[in-house]
Image: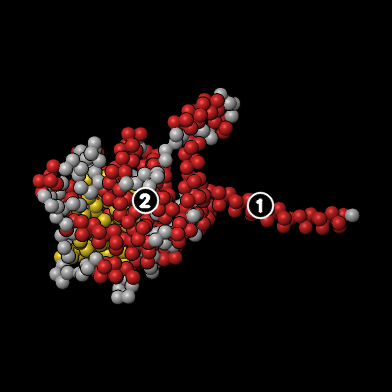
Amino acid sequence: LQQLHDLYQDLCQEESSSSSTTHCRMVWLGGYSGTGKSSCVQEFVRQLQQDNKDNGATPPSAFVHGKYDLGSGNLSYSALLQAWNAYFTQLAQDSNHDTLQELRQRLQRVGEINVQSEHYQVLCDTLTPSLSLILEPPSQQSQEVIAEEKEEEEEDTTEQEGSNHNAPESSQWNNNQNNNATSNKNTGAGLLKRDIRVIQFAFQLLVKAIATPSSSNPSGPLIFWLDDLQWADVASLQLLSTLLQDWINMSSTTTASTDKASSSAVAPPKLLFIGAFRSNEVQDPNHVFNRLLKQDLKVDHAEESTNDNNGTTTAATTNLITTMELSNLSPDSIGQFIADCLGGDMTPDDVSPITQAVYSKTLGNIFSVQQALEELVRKQAIYYDVISFSWQFGNAILNHDENDKNGKSSLLEDYLSDDVVQMVQNKLQTLPPVLQTALAMAAYTNNSFQLDLLFALLVNKSHQQRQMQSSSTLPTASNNNNNNN
């Protein structure tokens, strides 16, 4: 986590007067499933935002995040579509007119991206349909008409009718969203019509424009994070390879004159790219991701690496590219984590029986450790005492012989399932049936989904169940009538 902060600060401190036309840092974050790769990046971004709020530190110019699924290999650019569509949609909802206008000017100045340009059409057809929400805002005339309709609706008697016009731009917003959904459906057709080199060039211009700090509101680098790259499709990896190699080349290119660079009013774009992947799933030399990581970008793991006590191995390859490997935590770190979770005056020595039992089942995998602790709480081996306002061990553990540490550990192990899969299954079984059904349906979608879609599926399922129940009772009623006759 500290290494990510150091890389970010290095980028922020690089001035436009340096000899590079752009500035970038790339981080390859590997590790087994459950070692905390995603949590590490999420905490990094959260701390940046909090530091900016509390101390006025330099905020990132943007944070763009996408995540690949197990079935992403059959869908071109799935995580890129998810990441950039979510970014532009959120930006259109939260930003004021001046901010959006400045972004439009930056897109035009840096990338020549406007509603009439070919770059815009390529991006909307392939990677970022929601870019239209930024470059095609509701017209002033549409806003006035919608405002008048809003005033008329407020005079109606039913609250439900009035709720359909929550804001002056709601109608146009819904139209844009519908158009966005249509664009998503046509994305596959757009990919077939566009040359891959045209898509790559347009995407490079888009990233460069977003990574360029605003002249009116200086900011840090663009943080572009893609998760679970071991499942990325070939087209995505090719696009990333071209994009990142272009940034490496630009960062290594010196300007013709340092004085000219220092006198320029436009700050150079800055990019912090983070690519997370499960290292155990890309060990095959023929895996397509290895080509991006080790060949196309010419990144070879350094022979000498540093390993800290928190399970992080760092191998710095160049000043631009860093590889980090997150591993399982040590027993001492797990003991400290459990003591911190229980709070109070607990020390690692106090929770050593729990540490021994949990570590024997999880081997220090932090996700599995969390599931094991939850299972101990569900089975009341660990419980919260409302009298002392603290977490306590179970009575059987308290009464056990203090000298028999192995016995205490075995006693706790009896409360734990054999593996993390069984732990999660046991937790799911404690949920209400309707929530179990919702999770089962959500499992058929991507790693993110719309709540209104899930609600519609649940309502439709309940309606079908009622229809089946009513239809199954009809023959019985008919037979009874025939018998009466």
Kind of element beneath mark 2: helix
Q: Which mark is residue 466?
A: 1
Q: Nearer the viewer, residue 318 or 52?
A: 318
Which is closer to the viewer, label 1 or label 2? 2
Q: Nearer the viewer, residue 113 or 168?
A: 113
Position of residue 193 measured from the top left corner of the image (x, y, whole percent): 45, 59
Looking at the picture, which amino acid does disc 2 mark?
Answer: His
How many C-alpha atoms fall within 10 Å of the one at disc 2: few (<14), some, or many (≥20)? Answer: many
Which of the two discs, 1 and 2, labels the residue nearer the N terminus?
2
The C terminus sits in image quarter? bottom right
Position of residue 365 measured from the top left corner of the image (x, y, whole percent): 30, 64
Q: Residue at x 25, y 70 (%)?
A: 295
Q: Nearer the viewer, residue 395 or 453?
A: 453
Q: Residue at x 34, y 58 (%)?
A: 200
The N terminus sits in image quarter? bottom left
The residue singled out by tag 2 in the image is 119
Q: Residue at x 17, y 65 (%)?
A: 317
Position of residue 448 measured from the top left corner of the image (x, y, whole percent): 43, 53
Going by the picture, which residue comes out furthest to the top?
A: 155
How many C-alpha atoms fall within 10 Å of the one at disc 1: few (<14), some, or many (≥20)? Answer: few
Going by the picture, which residue comes out furthest to the right?
A: 485
Q: Which mark is residue 293?
A: none
Is residue 183 shown to the viewer in this render?
yes
Q: Residue at x 14, y 52 (%)?
A: 255
Is residue 39 positioned above or below 365 on the image? above
